[in-house]
Structure formats: structure tokens, C-alpha cells
Amino acid sequence: MASRVSAGSDAARFFTRRLRREGSAARARGEKAYLKSELQFWGTGQDPIRLAVREFCDAYRDLSRADLREVAETLYATDVHELRASAIGVLERNHHTLVDRDLPWLITLVRKSKSWAYVDWIAPKVIGNVIARDPRARRRLPVWARDEDFWVRRAALLAEHDALRAGGGDFALWSRLAAPMLDEREFFIRKAIGWVLREVSKKRPALSYEFLRKHQDRVSRLSMQEGAKYLPAAERKALGLPAAPAWMAREAKRKVASRRS
């Protein structure tokens, strides 16, 4: 078993050696601009990062909770995008080891992330998996939903994204978290609300429709359009939207164009 002292430094050496050489200066410039980030980028793609994470986890099969925290905090202490992404990858592959007591330091990683590229990975794939195994951990979500940091609030909204999409999760709780945020102007909050409603609607359209109907006067245009994207035509019309969403019109035009070519 790796010791807490060595796990973090070993991880930093391993991922630096593997990922820096896989990088591209042109890709680094593009990703940095796209994410509008102040971090350093090596320009290493997601596939090489995931491969390196898998190899690291194969080499360190018995990482304890303390080891995982050391690895994550060491890699997050750098200013390198690829190392932070690797930290999340290691946590995701070892999510079964983490428990409710680890959520306070995991939410600290969210605070340090300050980007959807990390928050949207940590929230459903790490925090969400802890909640799925120990539903009592949901008690933390209302606290996070009232946090001053909108990235923490976004994490509260997305933590049960995967469970809700699969037909599980606690939609009633999610609704209570989301409703007070409907008046927010922050793009990443509005987008998260719509994103979750859209995914819920694929299996349980009545839940998404009822939430949007109940709060129709307060839901932002972004959240409404995203959340109602896959709702039936009658329900979309009842919400004041066109019967067919824009993506269907675009898809129809694409098919017509492809038949003509």
C-alpha cells in the first residue's frame, strides 16, 4: 500500500513524466483559450490523460482514503491543467473508497477548480458516487446550494445528475435546491438547471414538465429551452415554446441536404 507521504509525490512525478511529453503547444494554446483559464496547459488530450490514470491506478491498487486525498491535493496544488484532470480521474476510479467524511475536502477541490471542466467531472462522478452509496450524504447538498461560490452551487445541482438521468436520485430534493436559484443570472447555474431537467425528461418527462410549469414565470430562457428540449410537443406548447425544438429543425435540414448531395 502506498504511504500517504509517497502517494502524492509519486503521482506528481508519474503524471508529469507521462503527460508533458504527450502535449502539443498548439493544443495547449487552444485549450487555454477555450477554457479561459490562467492555468498552465501542456496540450495533452483527454485520451492520454485517462490512459495514464488507468496505468497509475493499476500500479497503485490499494490507495487508502488518506492516499487519495494526498494525491488529489498534491496535483491540485500545481497550476497545470493536466495534473488537476489526472487528480479527478484517480478519484473517479477509486470512488468506491471514498465516504461521506471525505466530502468536505472534495468540495474544497470544487472551490479551487473554478471551471466547468473540473466541476462537471467531480460533482457527478466523484461526489455523486459517494452519495449513491450513502444517501445520508445528501444532507450536505442544501448547504452547498446556499453557498456564496456559484461553482459550489453548481456542484450541488449536478451531484445527482447521473442518478437522476438513470431514473433514480432524489428529484424532490433537487427541485428544492434548484427553485431558489431560478432568479440567478449566472450562466453556469442556469445551464446546470436546464441540463439536469433535460436529462431527467428522457426517462421521466412528467417531472421535468411539472417543474418547468410550476416555475414558468421564473425560469430563464436558457433553462427553459434546455430543460424542455426533449419534452413532447403538447407540453412544449403549454410552456410557450414551439412544438418542435430547434435541434429537430436543424436535423431535418441536415437530412434534406444529405439526400440532395
Image (cartoon, rainbow, N blue to C red):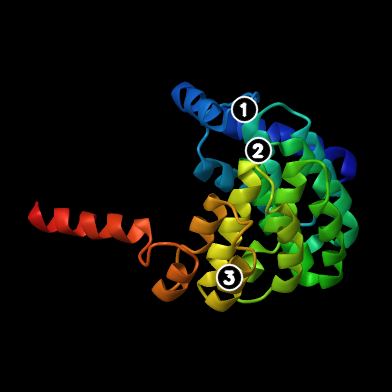
Crowding around mark 1 (Cα neighbors within 10 Å: few <14, some 14 to 19, many 20+) is: few
| Residue positioned 58% across, 52% down in the render | 220
Residue displayed at 46% across by 63% down: 240
Query: For this rendering, which residue is in front, 26 or 164?
Result: 164
* Relative depth, front residue between 254 and 85: 254
> What residue is shown with label 3?
208
Cβ–Cβ below 8 Å for labels 1 and 2?
A: yes
In this rendering, which labeled residue sits more in front, label 2 or label 3?
A: 3
- Give the distance between the C-alpha atoms of the residues marked 2 and 3, in whole angstroms: 26 Å
Q: CA distance from mark 3 to mark 1?
A: 33 Å
Q: From where the camera sits, is residue 104 visible? A: yes
The answer to whether residue 91 of the structure is visible from this angle is no
Picture residue at 63% right of the left edge, 44% below the top:
188
Position of residue 149 measured from the top left corner of the image (x, y, whole percent): 79, 41
> What residue sits right under mark 2 in the picture?
115
Q: Give the residue type at disc 1.
A: Ser
Tell me: 209 left or right of 218: left
Instruction: Please report contact status of discs 3 and 1: CB closer than 8 Å, yes or no.
Output: no
Which secondary structure, mark 2?
loop
Label 2 Cα neighbours within 10 Å, binned few <14 / some 14-19 / many ≥20: some
Number of numbered markers: 3
Label whose residue precedes the other's in the sequence (2 or 3): 2
Q: Circle 1 sits on which residue?
A: 37
